[in-house]
Structures are given as structure tokens and as C-alpha cells.
Amino acid sequence: METYNEDQRNARKRKSYHIEGEVEEDDDIEEMPERPIGQKAAKKDARDAKIWMMMENHLHRRLMWRSLTNLAKSRKI
């Protein structure tokens, strides 16, 4: 007994086989250019860059504070 879903599955198999066969015949086809980055990925990249910048600033301030306190301690002695 063949169901509705089996017809769809068989159609997909035929379609994918046909597409794969064409790709194998034409080996010198240029690759498609990469798609532009999506909005969600762009927002994530911007957020990650902002976080890294904040971490670097925090580290820089901390190192500067440490060096200033060490300088002040050395001058007191």
C-alpha cells in the first residue's frame, strides 16, 4: 500500500538524483559566491565585538591601576 508521503519521498529522490547527476557531469562549474551574512548573525557578531572591547578596556584599566599602585608604593618606600 502506497501512501501520500511515499509519493512525495519518491519525487524528492528523483529530483535529488537528477541534480546530483548534473553536478557530476560539469566539474568545471564555478562555485556559487558566498551568501551575505544574515541579520541575526550580524547582530551576534556586533554583540561579540562589543563584549570583547569591554573586556579589553576592563583589563587595560585594571593593569593601569595595578601599575599606578605599584608606582605609588615604590615612591613611598
Image (cartoon, rainbow, N blue to C red):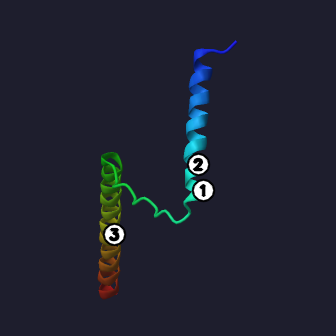
Q: Secondary structure at mark 2?
A: helix
Q: Give the residue drawn at x 30%, y 67%.
A: 57
Q: Is residue 14 above or below residue 32?
A: above
Answer whether labels 3 and 1 touch (C-beta < 8 Å). Answer: no
The answer for how far apart the CA atoms under marks 3 and 1 are is 59 Å
Q: Quadrant of residue 75?
A: bottom left
The residue at the point 33 percent across, 49 percent down is: 38
**In front of the other: label 2 or label 3?**
2
Q: Which amino acid type is marked by label 2?
A: Glu
Between discs 2 and 3, the one toward the N terminus: 2
Q: Residues within 10 Å of mark 3 (few under 14, many from 20)?
A: few
Residue at the disc numbered 2 = 20
Question: Hey, what amino acid is under mark 1?
Answer: Glu
23 relative to 75, above or below: above
Whole-number angstrom distance, CA of label 2 to CA of label 3: 58 Å
Residue tagged by mark 1? 24
